[in-house]
Amino acid sequence: MFTDRDGLIDDVLTKEQQDKLTPASVIELLKKGNQRFVAGEVTLRNHRAQIRKAVLSQFPKAIVLSCVDSRVPVEDVFDRGIGDLFVARVAGNFVNVDILGSMEFACHVSCAKVILVLGHEHCGAIKSAVDNVQLGNITLMLEKLLPAVSQTPGHEGQRTSKNEEFVHAVTVANVQLTMERIRNESPILRQMEQDQTIVICGAVYDMDNGEVSFLD
């Protein structure tokens, strides 16, 4: 770990360091970073120095697909600094052609090792999809989440946003279906995962305690 004279982390990831990483080691780094976040022991970083050092190049470890929710600060949740992560955000953390292209750039061009689909508890987009909200362009956006609602079994008579258990199940299903779509709709990323160059994985962020639970 590199520090400046004030004890702050001021380095950014280099190409050589990125090349030494494996998908498994990146996932472990994300897990340990989240543990620090939960414990309130986040790394102190010299952002001014990191900005200057990241001007001409970037070699991130992973790309995270997150919801737009302001209560999910992705870099903080994993205790990562400037140049560590690509982050794509859209309400309900689903994929479309633009996000798939961004993922292909992150992994195939910039050599990120992990694609992480990050859902979260108390997701307004998921709740709106569960309740079939109709409002402007939000309606079209929520259509991307409806398969997770329809494919989540059980909860007869209680398939509403007021049922936290059902909303959680839909949140998990949406993460899993998004992972499937990435594999099905991006031959590049599917092949990279088959070649074990990358790992496509999913997780759910718990707003109540800050913990990220990775899915099997």
Image: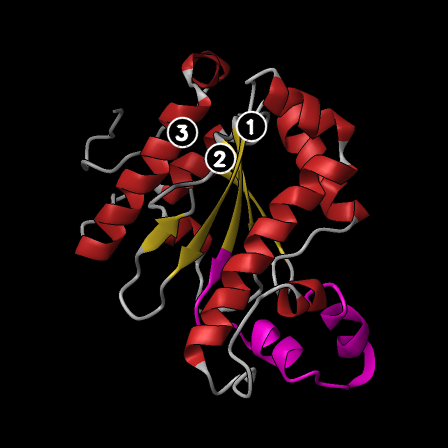
> Residue drawn 50% across and 52% down?
118
Q: Say which quadrant the C terminus sits in.
A: top left
Closest to the observer: 34 or 159? 159
Q: Residue 37's x, y, as percent?
A: 26, 52
**How far is the residue under mark 2 from the one under mark 3?**
14 Å
Magenta run includes residue 197: no
Q: Residue 54's x, y, as percent?
A: 51, 31
Compared to residue 40, the image places residue 91 above or below, namely below
Q: Nearer the viewer, mark 1 or mark 3?
A: 3
Which stretch appears magenta? 119-145
Residue 58 visible (yes or no): yes
Compared to residue 188, the image places residue 71 above or below, namely below
Colour approach in the figure: secondary structure
Left or right of 189 on screen, residue 6: left
User: Disc 2 or 3, which lies upstream in sequence?
Assistant: 3
**The residue tagged with tag 2: helix, strand or loop?**
loop
Amino acid marked by disc 1: Gln
Residue designated by label 2: 83
